[in-house]
Amino acid sequence: MGHFKIDHDIINGEALPAFSLTIDDSYTTAVYSDIDMQAELVKILRSNAGVTVFDRQEGLYIRLTVEANLSFYRKWFGSRTPLPEILVQFELHSCAKTPLYKCSESELHRVYFAKYYMSGTNPVVFREPIHGVDVKTIDTFINMLQRIREDGTPVLVLISNMEHALLLGDAAYKLQDSGMQPIEIDDGEDEIPEDGTTGAQTTANLFKIPAKVDDKMILFDPPEIDYIESQDGKAMIIINDEMYAMDSTLAEIEKKLEVYGFYRCHRSYIVNLQKVREIITWSKNTYSLRIDNRVQSTIPLSRTKIQDIQEKFSLK
């Protein structure tokens, strides 16, 4: 079993808190942090640990076709995977004859993924791999992670988006000033409300949802809210890409919002079902909900909640 370890000796500075983390080859490890901490960690991995971080910053041959680029890199890295197989695996067969400068952003991401896969690098560290790409590209990346793990290669993904960390990581951690803390991955166990009941409320007793902005208290109508996310034990209201802090936990607010069509889709998320646009099934047997808002947010859906939510939308 292979692994890669980040320990105190590698950190060795004041830019990041001291921590140790072992990246095992049997699962993908995701580290969620803000952009500044992520940049410091990347710098440390490159300079102190000699690790290659894949962030798509190096150039490709933009005037060559997708096929010509991958053919070149296949020979360069000595990859044994046939080129036609690579094109199919990374969903590039339909644009194989297209010059890179005519490709979409998502297609370019998949070219980079194919290049990184053929490089045979060990360990593999990705930085923000699925930011701003389409569903096909996310699914392609998840498939690639599975193949890399099957090859016995430790995988670390650095992410500044909590939803992406939960989607990509079999083990997820949050890096902040206080150190590295594990993020609880939903294990699919149905949660029992604190009062021991399992039935939904039948009366509406909350018409405005309070949240703090600086020293002000703002009151939101439930239909305005896209979803509510748990961060460090506190509930955060999300509307498009705006976030508002509540003086409540997710468990406390869940009971009050159930009657308004909100649903606990994941240990860390409550979603407004009226805002759900799409149920996405990923290759690793995980699920997400796409929200019908300006930024087209995606949030995790627990494996054991898929049947329940399909029934709510009369899909079964």
Image (tube, grey):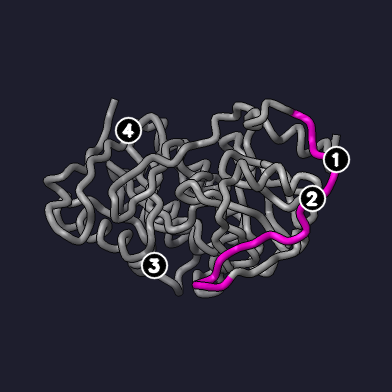
**What is the C-alpha distance between the residues marked 3 and 1?**
58 Å
**Span of residues in magenta:** 198-216
Q: Nearer the viewer, mark 4 or mark 2?
A: 2
How far across and down, in percent of the image, does residue 47 sit? Answer: 16, 58
How far across and down, in percent of the image, does residue 314 sit? Answer: 88, 40
**What is the C-alpha distance between the residues marked 3 and 2?**
58 Å
Residue beneath disc 2: 205
Q: Give the SS element for disc 2.
A: loop
Q: Nearer the viewer, mark 3 or mark 1?
A: 1
Decide: few, some or many residues near mark 3? Use Cα within 10 Å; few <14, some 14-19, many ≥20: some
Earlier along the polypeptide chain: callout 3 or callout 2?
3
Q: Which mark is residue 202?
A: 1
Earlier along the polypeptide chain: callout 4 or callout 2?
4
Q: Give the SS element for disc 4.
A: strand
Decide: few, some or many residues near mark 1? Use Cα within 10 Å; few <14, some 14-19, many ≥20: few
Amino acid at the residue labelled 4: Asp
The residue at the point 59 percent across, 45 percent down is: 250
The quadrant in which the N terminus is found is: top left
Residue 176 sits in quarter: bottom left
